[in-house]
Amino acid sequence: MFAILLQISAIVTVSTVHAKYSVSTNTILLNDGNRMPILSLGTFGKTNIADKVVKTAVIEAIEAGYRQIDTAAAYKNEEFIGEAIADVINRGIVTREELWITTKLHPEVGSREGVLPALRDSLKKLKIDCVDLFLIHSPDNLGGIPEHDYLSVWKGMEDAKKLNLARSIGVSNFNSTHINRILATSEIIPATNEIEVNPTYTNLELVAYCQSLNITVLSYAPFGFMVPRPFSLVPVVSTFEEPILVQLAQKYGKMPSQIVIRYLIDRGTIPIPRSVNASRMRLNIDVFDFQLTPEEIILINELNQNVKVYYFEGKRFLAFVEYFGLL
Ligand SMILES: NC(=O)c1ccc[n+]([C@@H]2O[C@H](COP(=O)([O-])OP(=O)(O)OC[C@H]3O[C@@H](n4cnc5c(N)ncnc54)[C@H](OP(=O)(O)O)[C@@H]3O)[C@@H](O)[C@H]2O)c1
Ligand SMILES: *[C@@H]1O[C@H](CO)[C@@H](O)[C@H](O)[C@H]1NC(C)=O
Ligand SMILES: *[C@@H]1O[C@H](CO)[C@@H](O)[C@H](O)[C@H]1NC(C)=O
Ligand SMILES: *[C@@H]1O[C@H](CO)[C@@H](O)[C@H](O)[C@H]1NC(C)=O
């Protein structure tokens, strides 16, 4: 029954998700009625150099047309992003209302009581009164704290929405079991699930499951193993020279990297490419003048290697924590 449902929703989503997209505003309608931009800027990098690169990168991105920024308390960069937001608003490049700021709860918060104080700390660093999207970073106890319970944490997320400290609330790194437990015990359905989706980890079932519930998927690590992953201990390598990407790039007069971003948009998800290089940022957002066909999406799905870039267990997790300086 479940498998059949997944197959049906996988077919249906290709044709129905577009109905929720607004082509004129490049936004998608969430299940809580809010509209969010369909492309985000990733900001996760080495924490010890965040102060030197993130502020400039965010300013350049907003000047280039990005309207959504993806950060997290754990990235230790909210303060610099706050400076960038203040700068572009003060200079009249955008208004606060035109921006969509997404942040994530610190993984060391494991219960309802911790949520509002942690969110207020993020808001202070970001220099804003309300975040547009607030996510539970992971259902797993990444901080290794006692009595961690994501269902209790979700109650705190609901508190944040009711107090208008977060316009939309959602989750990240949740699988279908985690989502089902939330649905069974909570008042508010998550608006989004931010998970790894890219050509080397296509994540078809989980994306389809979320979309069948009207939960919008944000695709992190959109370039998968097609870009260098110095912290990775797995031997997966792919490149932007994959023949199908090169062929589609020629067809549409684009770069293979732009085909990858468009692939994620045409699957009805919101990609979160990260770059601190202004010319790449401009390439990554220049994807709104073409669209892939359902057949082309299926061909790119064939690049799946079913290996995650970001894996939160064992040695692979430790190597990642150490590389980025997360402790
Ligand atoms: N919720 C979670 O648990 C979670 C986990 C992982 C990531 N995320 C979010 O998702 C974002 C994206 O993931 P990611 O940082 O792994 O990003 P990604 O966008 O898949 O890869 C970033 C890398 O690709 C390079 N790059 C960017 N555009 C390029 C282009 N057009 N051509 C060639 N190389 C290009 C960047 O280098 P340059 O900077 O030099 O261009 C950087 O090294 C993160 O920053 C974070 O905001 C969330
Ligand atoms: C998803 O949520 C939006 C906003 O509440 C609603 O308009 C739309 O009909 C929902 N779509 C589905 C398939 O339930
Ligand atoms: C989701 O992850 C949990 C571990 O956090 C695991 O117990 C469960 O089996 C997973 N569910 C699916 C559908 O993969
Ligand atoms: C920035 O991106 C461009 C591609 O658009 C590339 O040619 C250049 O080498 C990159 N610069 C750095 C410092 O990586």
Image (tube, rainbow, N blue to C red):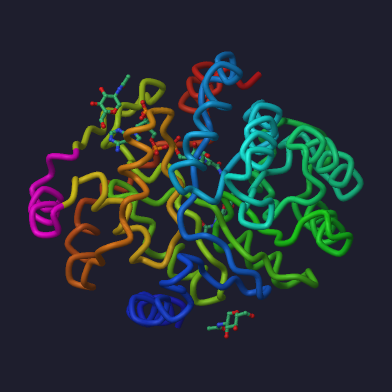
The verdict on residue 301 being magenta is no
The verdict on residue 247 being magenta is yes
Q: Is residue 281 left or right of residue 154?
A: left
Question: In this picture, is 182 found above or below 84?
Answer: below
Q: Which residues are magenta?
A: 240-253
Q: Quadrant of residue 229?
A: top left
What percent of the width, then of the height, locates residue 218?
Answer: 50, 55
Q: Quadrant of ligand 2?
A: bottom right
Instruction: Identify which residue is drawn at 60% across, 49% down.
Output: 94
What percent of the width, then of the height, locates residue 158?
Answer: 82, 61
Q: Quadrant of residue 165?
A: bottom right
The overriding secondary structure of the stretch rendered in magenta is helix
Report the number of discs.
0
What percent of the width, then of the height, locates residue 20?
Answer: 48, 77
What percent of the width, then of the height, locates residue 304?
Answer: 26, 51
Q: Quadrant of the C terminus?
A: top right
Instruction: Identify which residue is drawn at 46% across, 54% down.
Output: 39
Instruction: Identify which residue is drawn at 32% across, 28% down.
Output: 234
